[in-house]
Amino acid sequence: MAKVLFCVPLALTIFSFFCLIPCFALASENNSNGCLRYGFYDESCPDAERIIFNAVADKFSEAPESTAGALRIFFHDCFVEGCDASVLIVSSSTTKAERDAEINLSLSANGFDLFFRAKEAVESQCPKKVSCADVMTIATRDCVYMLGGPRFEVQTGRRDGLTSEASTVLANIPQPNQTLSQIISLFKSKGLSVLDMVVLSGAHTIGASHCKEFMNRIYSYNASFEIDPTMDQKYAKKLRETCPERKLDPTVLAFNDVTTPLDFDNAYYSNLQKGLGLLGTDQILALDPRSRAYVDLMAKDNQVFVSHFIKSVVKLGTVGVKTGEEGEIRHYCGSFNT
Ligand code: HEM
Ligand SMILES: *[C@@H]1O[C@H](CO)[C@@H](O)[C@H](O)[C@H]1NC(C)=O
Ligand SMILES: *[C@@H]1O[C@H](CO)[C@@H](O)[C@H](O)[C@H]1NC(C)=O
Ligand SMILES: CC(=O)N[C@H]1CO[C@H](CO)[C@@H](O)[C@@H]1O
Ligand SMILES: CC(=O)N[C@H]1CO[C@H](CO)[C@@H](O)[C@@H]1O
Protein backbone atom coordinates (compact mmCIF):
# COMPACT_ATOMS: atom_id res chain seq x y z
CA MET A 1 0.00 0.00 0.00
CA ALA A 2 2.89 2.37 0.70
CA LYS A 3 3.63 2.47 -2.98
CA VAL A 4 0.16 3.66 -3.81
CA LEU A 5 0.71 6.69 -1.62
CA PHE A 6 3.39 8.22 -3.76
CA CYS A 7 0.86 8.67 -6.52
CA VAL A 8 -1.33 10.83 -4.35
CA PRO A 9 0.81 13.97 -4.74
CA LEU A 10 0.77 13.36 -8.44
CA ALA A 11 -2.98 13.35 -8.26
CA LEU A 12 -2.69 17.08 -7.93
CA THR A 13 -1.21 17.29 -11.34
CA ILE A 14 -2.88 17.13 -14.66
CA PHE A 15 -1.58 13.60 -15.07
CA SER A 16 -3.44 12.33 -12.08
CA PHE A 17 -6.04 10.64 -14.15
CA PHE A 18 -3.51 8.52 -15.98
CA CYS A 19 -1.58 7.80 -12.86
CA LEU A 20 -4.17 7.00 -10.24
CA ILE A 21 -6.21 4.52 -12.15
CA PRO A 22 -3.40 2.07 -12.81
CA CYS A 23 -2.11 2.71 -9.29
CA PHE A 24 -5.26 1.63 -7.57
CA ALA A 25 -6.22 -0.98 -10.08
CA LEU A 26 -2.91 -2.77 -10.18
CA ALA A 27 -0.94 -2.08 -7.02
CA SER A 28 -0.81 -5.19 -4.89
CA GLU A 29 0.82 -5.69 -1.56
CA ASN A 30 4.35 -6.35 -2.67
CA ASN A 31 4.38 -4.90 -6.08
CA SER A 32 4.48 -1.21 -6.45
CA ASN A 33 3.70 -0.95 -10.12
CA GLY A 34 2.50 2.50 -9.23
CA CYS A 35 2.63 4.40 -12.45
CA LEU A 36 3.76 1.90 -15.01
CA ARG A 37 1.91 2.65 -18.20
CA TYR A 38 1.95 2.14 -21.93
CA GLY A 39 3.96 4.67 -23.90
CA PHE A 40 5.85 6.09 -20.93
CA TYR A 41 8.65 7.20 -23.30
CA ASP A 42 6.43 8.53 -26.10
CA GLU A 43 7.62 12.07 -25.40
CA SER A 44 11.11 11.58 -23.95
CA CYS A 45 12.37 8.86 -26.29
CA PRO A 46 9.77 7.94 -28.88
CA ASP A 47 12.02 5.47 -30.71
CA ALA A 48 13.15 3.59 -27.59
CA GLU A 49 11.30 0.37 -28.37
CA ARG A 50 12.45 0.27 -31.98
CA ILE A 51 16.07 0.93 -30.99
CA ILE A 52 15.96 -1.82 -28.38
CA PHE A 53 14.34 -4.25 -30.81
CA ASN A 54 17.11 -3.66 -33.35
CA ALA A 55 19.82 -4.15 -30.75
CA VAL A 56 18.22 -7.40 -29.61
CA ALA A 57 17.86 -8.58 -33.21
CA ASP A 58 21.57 -7.91 -33.83
CA LYS A 59 22.61 -9.80 -30.73
CA PHE A 60 20.23 -12.63 -31.60
CA SER A 61 21.77 -13.06 -35.04
CA GLU A 62 25.28 -13.16 -33.56
CA ALA A 63 24.55 -15.30 -30.52
CA PRO A 64 21.02 -16.73 -30.49
CA GLU A 65 21.55 -18.39 -27.10
CA SER A 66 21.90 -14.93 -25.55
CA THR A 67 18.12 -14.55 -25.67
CA ALA A 68 17.52 -17.50 -23.33
CA GLY A 69 20.22 -16.14 -21.05
CA ALA A 70 18.52 -12.75 -21.06
CA LEU A 71 15.12 -14.20 -20.17
CA ARG A 72 16.64 -15.98 -17.18
CA ILE A 73 18.52 -12.87 -16.04
CA PHE A 74 15.29 -10.86 -16.24
CA PHE A 75 13.59 -13.44 -14.00
CA HIS A 76 16.43 -13.27 -11.48
CA ASP A 77 16.40 -9.49 -11.53
CA CYS A 78 12.70 -9.37 -10.72
CA PHE A 79 12.97 -11.90 -7.89
CA VAL A 80 15.86 -10.12 -6.18
CA GLU A 81 14.85 -6.62 -5.03
CA GLY A 82 12.23 -6.32 -7.79
CA CYS A 83 12.59 -5.59 -11.51
CA ASP A 84 15.08 -2.75 -11.07
CA ALA A 85 18.11 -3.87 -13.09
CA SER A 86 20.04 -4.43 -9.86
CA VAL A 87 21.26 -7.68 -11.43
CA LEU A 88 23.27 -5.71 -14.01
CA ILE A 89 25.43 -3.89 -11.44
CA VAL A 90 29.07 -4.92 -11.61
CA SER A 91 30.84 -5.72 -8.34
CA SER A 92 33.38 -3.23 -7.05
CA SER A 93 36.53 -3.95 -5.06
CA THR A 94 34.53 -3.54 -1.87
CA THR A 95 31.05 -4.91 -2.67
CA LYS A 96 29.93 -8.15 -4.28
CA ALA A 97 26.93 -7.39 -6.50
CA GLU A 98 23.96 -9.67 -7.29
CA ARG A 99 25.38 -11.01 -10.52
CA ASP A 100 28.42 -12.35 -8.69
CA ALA A 101 26.52 -14.33 -6.08
CA GLU A 102 27.61 -17.99 -6.18
CA ILE A 103 24.27 -18.98 -7.59
CA ASN A 104 24.64 -16.38 -10.33
CA LEU A 105 27.81 -17.75 -11.75
CA SER A 106 25.95 -19.62 -14.46
CA LEU A 107 24.00 -16.63 -15.75
CA SER A 108 25.04 -16.25 -19.35
CA ALA A 109 27.54 -13.52 -20.15
CA ASN A 110 25.88 -13.14 -23.54
CA GLY A 111 22.55 -12.45 -21.87
CA PHE A 112 24.12 -9.59 -19.91
CA ASP A 113 25.73 -8.29 -23.07
CA LEU A 114 22.35 -8.23 -24.82
CA PHE A 115 20.98 -5.83 -22.18
CA PHE A 116 24.11 -3.66 -22.10
CA ARG A 117 24.05 -3.27 -25.87
CA ALA A 118 20.36 -2.43 -25.94
CA LYS A 119 20.89 0.26 -23.29
CA GLU A 120 23.93 1.68 -25.10
CA ALA A 121 21.91 1.95 -28.32
CA VAL A 122 19.15 3.82 -26.46
CA GLU A 123 21.62 6.09 -24.66
CA SER A 124 23.12 7.20 -27.95
CA GLN A 125 19.71 8.59 -28.96
CA CYS A 126 18.19 9.66 -25.64
CA PRO A 127 20.75 9.87 -22.86
CA LYS A 128 19.50 9.22 -19.32
CA LYS A 129 15.87 8.97 -20.29
CA VAL A 130 15.16 5.24 -20.37
CA SER A 131 15.85 3.16 -17.26
CA CYS A 132 17.88 -0.04 -17.41
CA ALA A 133 14.91 -1.78 -15.79
CA ASP A 134 12.66 -0.79 -18.70
CA VAL A 135 15.36 -1.68 -21.24
CA MET A 136 15.48 -5.13 -19.64
CA THR A 137 11.70 -5.49 -19.77
CA ILE A 138 11.39 -4.41 -23.40
CA ALA A 139 14.44 -6.41 -24.51
CA THR A 140 13.20 -9.54 -22.74
CA ARG A 141 9.83 -9.15 -24.43
CA ASP A 142 11.67 -8.95 -27.77
CA CYS A 143 13.74 -12.04 -26.94
CA VAL A 144 10.57 -14.07 -26.47
CA TYR A 145 9.35 -12.91 -29.86
CA MET A 146 12.66 -13.67 -31.53
CA LEU A 147 12.59 -17.19 -30.19
CA GLY A 148 9.28 -17.77 -31.94
CA GLY A 149 7.09 -16.80 -29.01
CA PRO A 150 4.37 -14.18 -28.94
CA ARG A 151 4.67 -10.44 -29.48
CA PHE A 152 3.02 -8.35 -26.76
CA GLU A 153 2.94 -4.86 -25.28
CA VAL A 154 4.63 -3.99 -22.00
CA GLN A 155 4.10 -1.04 -19.70
CA THR A 156 7.08 1.12 -18.75
CA GLY A 157 8.06 3.69 -16.16
CA ARG A 158 10.35 1.52 -14.00
CA ARG A 159 13.26 3.13 -12.19
CA ASP A 160 16.64 1.57 -11.51
CA GLY A 161 17.47 0.33 -8.03
CA LEU A 162 20.14 1.79 -5.81
CA THR A 163 21.40 -1.45 -4.25
CA SER A 164 22.78 -4.76 -5.48
CA GLU A 165 24.04 -7.27 -2.93
CA ALA A 166 25.14 -10.81 -3.64
CA SER A 167 23.94 -11.84 -0.18
CA THR A 168 20.28 -11.19 -1.09
CA VAL A 169 20.28 -13.58 -4.04
CA LEU A 170 20.23 -17.10 -2.59
CA ALA A 171 17.02 -16.77 -0.58
CA ASN A 172 15.15 -15.27 -3.55
CA ILE A 173 16.10 -17.55 -6.41
CA PRO A 174 14.52 -21.00 -6.75
CA GLN A 175 16.81 -24.03 -6.75
CA PRO A 176 16.24 -27.18 -8.82
CA ASN A 177 16.48 -29.37 -5.72
CA GLN A 178 13.79 -27.51 -3.80
CA THR A 179 10.42 -28.97 -2.95
CA LEU A 180 7.30 -27.77 -4.73
CA SER A 181 6.13 -26.20 -1.47
CA GLN A 182 9.30 -24.11 -1.31
CA ILE A 183 8.91 -23.00 -4.93
CA ILE A 184 5.24 -22.16 -4.47
CA SER A 185 5.88 -20.08 -1.38
CA LEU A 186 8.76 -18.21 -3.02
CA PHE A 187 6.56 -17.29 -6.00
CA LYS A 188 3.74 -16.39 -3.65
CA SER A 189 6.04 -14.01 -1.77
CA LYS A 190 6.46 -12.17 -5.09
CA GLY A 191 2.71 -12.00 -5.66
CA LEU A 192 2.72 -14.86 -8.19
CA SER A 193 0.24 -17.73 -8.05
CA VAL A 194 0.80 -21.45 -8.63
CA LEU A 195 -0.60 -20.94 -12.13
CA ASP A 196 1.88 -18.10 -12.77
CA MET A 197 4.67 -20.35 -11.49
CA VAL A 198 3.72 -23.24 -13.78
CA VAL A 199 3.32 -20.90 -16.75
CA LEU A 200 6.60 -19.06 -16.13
CA SER A 201 8.43 -22.37 -15.74
CA GLY A 202 7.43 -22.79 -19.38
CA ALA A 203 10.39 -20.46 -20.07
CA HIS A 204 12.33 -23.74 -19.87
CA THR A 205 10.99 -24.41 -23.35
CA ILE A 206 14.27 -22.80 -24.39
CA GLY A 207 17.81 -22.65 -23.09
CA ALA A 208 19.98 -25.15 -21.33
CA SER A 209 21.24 -26.28 -17.93
CA HIS A 210 24.64 -27.33 -16.67
CA CYS A 211 25.07 -30.96 -15.68
CA LYS A 212 25.42 -30.21 -11.99
CA GLU A 213 21.84 -28.94 -11.91
CA PHE A 214 20.42 -32.43 -12.55
CA MET A 215 23.33 -34.83 -11.77
CA ASN A 216 21.67 -36.22 -8.68
CA ARG A 217 18.63 -37.24 -10.74
CA ILE A 218 20.70 -39.45 -13.05
CA TYR A 219 23.35 -40.87 -10.68
CA SER A 220 22.44 -40.64 -7.01
CA TYR A 221 18.75 -39.98 -6.63
CA ASN A 222 18.13 -41.67 -3.29
CA ALA A 223 18.89 -44.82 -1.29
CA SER A 224 16.65 -47.01 -3.45
CA PHE A 225 17.16 -45.50 -6.91
CA GLU A 226 20.24 -44.29 -8.75
CA ILE A 227 18.07 -42.73 -11.45
CA ASP A 228 15.01 -40.75 -10.47
CA PRO A 229 12.18 -43.22 -11.15
CA THR A 230 9.96 -40.37 -12.38
CA MET A 231 12.42 -39.71 -15.22
CA ASP A 232 12.12 -41.52 -18.54
CA GLN A 233 14.91 -44.09 -18.20
CA LYS A 234 16.14 -43.81 -21.80
CA TYR A 235 16.33 -40.05 -21.41
CA ALA A 236 18.32 -40.54 -18.21
CA LYS A 237 20.82 -42.82 -20.03
CA LYS A 238 21.27 -40.20 -22.75
CA LEU A 239 21.87 -37.55 -20.12
CA ARG A 240 24.50 -39.81 -18.54
CA GLU A 241 26.35 -39.81 -21.87
CA THR A 242 26.19 -36.01 -21.99
CA CYS A 243 27.24 -35.72 -18.37
CA PRO A 244 29.64 -38.52 -17.37
CA GLU A 245 29.89 -38.84 -13.61
CA ARG A 246 33.65 -39.36 -13.45
CA LYS A 247 34.73 -36.29 -15.33
CA LEU A 248 32.10 -33.67 -14.75
CA ASP A 249 32.73 -30.99 -17.34
CA PRO A 250 31.46 -27.63 -16.07
CA THR A 251 31.11 -26.32 -19.63
CA VAL A 252 28.66 -28.99 -20.78
CA LEU A 253 24.95 -28.20 -20.97
CA ALA A 254 21.78 -30.12 -21.76
CA PHE A 255 18.76 -28.54 -23.41
CA ASN A 256 15.91 -27.75 -21.04
CA ASP A 257 13.37 -28.86 -23.64
CA VAL A 258 14.65 -32.10 -25.13
CA THR A 259 12.13 -32.25 -27.98
CA THR A 260 12.04 -28.68 -29.40
CA PRO A 261 15.00 -27.00 -27.70
CA LEU A 262 15.12 -23.92 -29.89
CA ASP A 263 11.44 -23.11 -30.17
CA PHE A 264 9.33 -21.14 -27.76
CA ASP A 265 6.38 -23.51 -27.54
CA ASN A 266 4.42 -25.74 -25.16
CA ALA A 267 6.48 -28.89 -25.79
CA TYR A 268 8.05 -28.34 -22.37
CA TYR A 269 4.73 -29.42 -20.83
CA SER A 270 4.16 -32.51 -22.97
CA ASN A 271 7.73 -33.50 -22.12
CA LEU A 272 6.85 -33.32 -18.44
CA GLN A 273 3.87 -35.64 -19.00
CA LYS A 274 6.33 -38.21 -20.41
CA GLY A 275 9.02 -38.00 -17.75
CA LEU A 276 11.19 -35.83 -19.98
CA GLY A 277 11.63 -32.94 -17.56
CA LEU A 278 15.28 -32.02 -17.03
CA LEU A 279 15.29 -30.41 -13.59
CA GLY A 280 13.67 -31.91 -10.52
CA THR A 281 11.55 -28.77 -10.20
CA ASP A 282 10.36 -29.18 -13.79
CA GLN A 283 9.33 -32.81 -13.45
CA ILE A 284 7.50 -32.35 -10.16
CA LEU A 285 5.04 -29.97 -11.83
CA ALA A 286 3.48 -32.85 -13.75
CA LEU A 287 3.32 -35.11 -10.68
CA ASP A 288 2.00 -33.00 -7.85
CA PRO A 289 -1.75 -32.45 -7.64
CA ARG A 290 -1.23 -28.74 -6.94
CA SER A 291 0.26 -28.15 -10.41
CA ARG A 292 -0.57 -31.15 -12.60
CA ALA A 293 -3.84 -29.81 -14.00
CA TYR A 294 -2.05 -26.66 -15.18
CA VAL A 295 0.63 -28.72 -16.90
CA ASP A 296 -2.08 -30.70 -18.70
CA LEU A 297 -3.83 -27.49 -19.72
CA MET A 298 -0.65 -25.99 -21.19
CA ALA A 299 0.38 -29.23 -22.89
CA LYS A 300 -2.92 -29.47 -24.69
CA ASP A 301 -2.90 -26.19 -26.56
CA ASN A 302 0.00 -23.93 -27.51
CA GLN A 303 -2.32 -20.91 -27.79
CA VAL A 304 -3.47 -21.40 -24.23
CA PHE A 305 0.15 -21.54 -23.07
CA VAL A 306 1.07 -18.47 -25.09
CA SER A 307 -1.80 -16.35 -23.77
CA HIS A 308 -1.08 -17.38 -20.19
CA PHE A 309 2.63 -16.76 -20.66
CA ILE A 310 1.99 -13.20 -21.78
CA LYS A 311 -0.11 -12.51 -18.68
CA SER A 312 2.32 -14.09 -16.26
CA VAL A 313 5.50 -12.61 -17.72
CA VAL A 314 3.90 -9.16 -17.72
CA LYS A 315 3.03 -9.74 -14.06
CA LEU A 316 6.60 -10.88 -13.38
CA GLY A 317 7.71 -7.55 -14.84
CA THR A 318 5.78 -5.65 -12.16
CA VAL A 319 7.28 -7.42 -9.15
CA GLY A 320 8.69 -4.87 -6.70
CA VAL A 321 9.13 -2.18 -9.34
CA LYS A 322 10.31 1.29 -8.39
CA THR A 323 8.51 4.19 -10.03
CA GLY A 324 8.10 7.94 -9.83
CA GLU A 325 10.83 9.49 -7.73
CA GLU A 326 12.21 6.20 -6.44
CA GLY A 327 15.62 4.97 -7.56
CA GLU A 328 17.25 6.57 -10.57
CA ILE A 329 17.73 6.24 -14.31
CA ARG A 330 21.20 4.83 -14.66
CA HIS A 331 23.39 6.10 -17.44
CA TYR A 332 25.46 2.92 -17.58
CA CYS A 333 23.63 -0.19 -16.40
CA GLY A 334 26.70 -1.68 -14.73
CA SER A 335 27.06 1.05 -12.12
CA PHE A 336 24.99 3.48 -10.10
CA ASN A 337 25.05 7.14 -11.16
CA THR A 338 27.46 9.07 -9.04
C1 HEM B 1 10.41 -22.56 -10.98
C2 HEM B 1 11.63 -22.47 -10.52
C3 HEM B 1 12.86 -22.41 -11.40
C4 HEM B 1 14.01 -23.08 -11.16
C5 HEM B 1 14.31 -24.00 -9.99
C6 HEM B 1 14.91 -22.75 -12.24
C7 HEM B 1 16.19 -23.22 -12.34
C8 HEM B 1 16.99 -23.10 -13.46
C9 HEM B 1 18.29 -23.69 -13.61
C10 HEM B 1 19.02 -24.50 -12.55
C11 HEM B 1 18.72 -23.41 -14.86
C12 HEM B 1 20.06 -23.83 -15.49
C13 HEM B 1 21.09 -22.76 -15.24
C14 HEM B 1 22.44 -23.17 -15.75
O1 HEM B 1 22.85 -24.31 -15.57
O2 HEM B 1 23.12 -22.30 -16.35
C15 HEM B 1 17.70 -22.64 -15.51
C16 HEM B 1 17.76 -22.16 -16.79
C17 HEM B 1 16.85 -21.28 -17.33
N1 HEM B 1 15.77 -20.73 -16.67
FE1 HEM B 1 15.01 -21.35 -14.92
N2 HEM B 1 14.30 -21.91 -13.10
C18 HEM B 1 13.04 -21.66 -12.63
C19 HEM B 1 12.12 -20.79 -13.20
C20 HEM B 1 12.37 -20.00 -14.29
C21 HEM B 1 11.55 -18.88 -14.72
C22 HEM B 1 10.31 -18.40 -14.00
C23 HEM B 1 12.13 -18.38 -15.85
C24 HEM B 1 11.71 -17.20 -16.70
C25 HEM B 1 10.50 -16.72 -16.77
C26 HEM B 1 13.28 -19.20 -16.13
C27 HEM B 1 14.08 -19.07 -17.25
C28 HEM B 1 15.16 -19.87 -17.52
C29 HEM B 1 15.84 -19.87 -18.81
C30 HEM B 1 15.45 -19.09 -20.04
C31 HEM B 1 16.91 -20.76 -18.68
C32 HEM B 1 17.97 -21.10 -19.74
C33 HEM B 1 19.12 -20.14 -19.61
C34 HEM B 1 20.18 -20.29 -20.69
O3 HEM B 1 20.05 -21.14 -21.56
O4 HEM B 1 21.15 -19.50 -20.63
N3 HEM B 1 13.41 -20.14 -15.16
N4 HEM B 1 16.66 -22.44 -14.62
C1 LIG C 1 20.13 -27.77 -2.73
O1 LIG C 1 21.47 -27.76 -3.17
C2 LIG C 1 22.28 -26.78 -2.55
C3 LIG C 1 23.67 -26.86 -3.15
O2 LIG C 1 23.62 -27.02 -4.51
C4 LIG C 1 22.30 -27.00 -1.05
O3 LIG C 1 23.05 -25.96 -0.46
C5 LIG C 1 20.88 -26.99 -0.50
O4 LIG C 1 20.89 -27.32 0.86
C6 LIG C 1 20.00 -27.99 -1.23
N1 LIG C 1 18.64 -27.80 -0.82
C7 LIG C 1 17.78 -28.81 -0.62
C8 LIG C 1 16.37 -28.43 -0.26
O5 LIG C 1 18.11 -29.97 -0.73
C1 LIG D 1 13.17 -42.70 -3.48
O1 LIG D 1 12.31 -41.96 -4.33
C2 LIG D 1 11.14 -42.63 -4.71
C3 LIG D 1 10.39 -41.79 -5.74
O2 LIG D 1 10.34 -40.45 -5.38
C4 LIG D 1 10.29 -42.88 -3.46
O3 LIG D 1 9.10 -43.58 -3.81
C5 LIG D 1 11.11 -43.72 -2.49
O4 LIG D 1 10.38 -43.87 -1.29
C6 LIG D 1 12.44 -43.06 -2.19
N1 LIG D 1 13.26 -43.96 -1.41
C7 LIG D 1 13.97 -43.56 -0.36
C8 LIG D 1 14.74 -44.59 0.34
O5 LIG D 1 13.98 -42.39 0.02
C1 LIG E 1 32.71 -14.17 -9.49
C2 LIG E 1 32.33 -14.43 -10.91
O1 LIG E 1 32.91 -15.29 -11.56
N1 LIG E 1 31.32 -13.72 -11.40
C3 LIG E 1 30.79 -13.86 -12.73
C4 LIG E 1 29.27 -13.80 -12.68
O2 LIG E 1 28.71 -13.80 -13.96
C5 LIG E 1 29.17 -12.76 -14.79
C6 LIG E 1 28.44 -12.85 -16.09
O3 LIG E 1 28.62 -14.10 -16.69
C7 LIG E 1 30.69 -12.83 -14.98
O4 LIG E 1 31.12 -11.75 -15.76
C8 LIG E 1 31.36 -12.77 -13.62
O5 LIG E 1 32.74 -12.93 -13.76
C1 LIG F 1 1.67 -11.23 0.21
C2 LIG F 1 3.06 -11.18 0.74
O1 LIG F 1 3.82 -12.09 0.52
N1 LIG F 1 3.40 -10.12 1.46
C3 LIG F 1 4.75 -9.86 1.93
C4 LIG F 1 5.22 -8.50 1.45
O2 LIG F 1 6.49 -8.18 1.94
C5 LIG F 1 6.56 -8.11 3.35
C6 LIG F 1 7.97 -7.70 3.73
O3 LIG F 1 8.40 -6.66 2.92
C7 LIG F 1 6.21 -9.48 3.92
O4 LIG F 1 6.22 -9.42 5.35
C8 LIG F 1 4.82 -9.91 3.45
O5 LIG F 1 4.55 -11.21 3.89
Image (tube, rainbow, N blue to C red):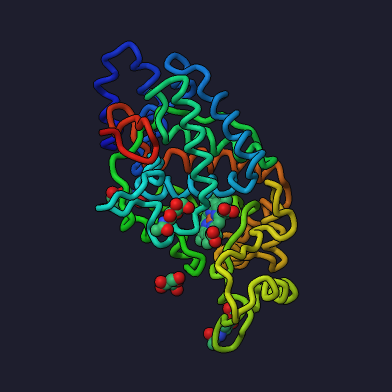
Residue at point 71% right, 76% down?
237
Where is residue 104? Give x, y as percent.
44, 57
> Which residue occupies the foreground of this view, 241 or 173?
241
Q: Which quarter of the rendering shows the C terminus? A: top left
Q: In this view, does 40 lie above or below 240?
A: above
Q: In which quarter of the image is ligand 3?
A: bottom right
Toward the bottom, the furthest residue is 224
Image quadrant of residue 49?
A: top right
Q: In this view, does 30 lie to the left or right of 273?
A: left
Q: Is residue 145 left or right of residue 1?
A: right
Q: Is residue 45 above or below residue 137?
A: above
Residue at point 29% right, 37% down?
1
Residue 148 shows up from this direction: yes
Residue 196 shows up from this direction: no
> Which residue occupies the foreground of this view, 123 or 134?
123
Where is residue 213? Give x, y as percent.
54, 67
Q: In this view, does 298 lie to the left or right of 321?
A: right
Residue at point 53% right, 42% down?
313
Residue at point 62% right, 34% down?
58
Where is residue 229? Give x, y as percent.
65, 78
Toward the front, the furthest residue is 93
Where is residue 211? Give x, y as percent.
58, 69
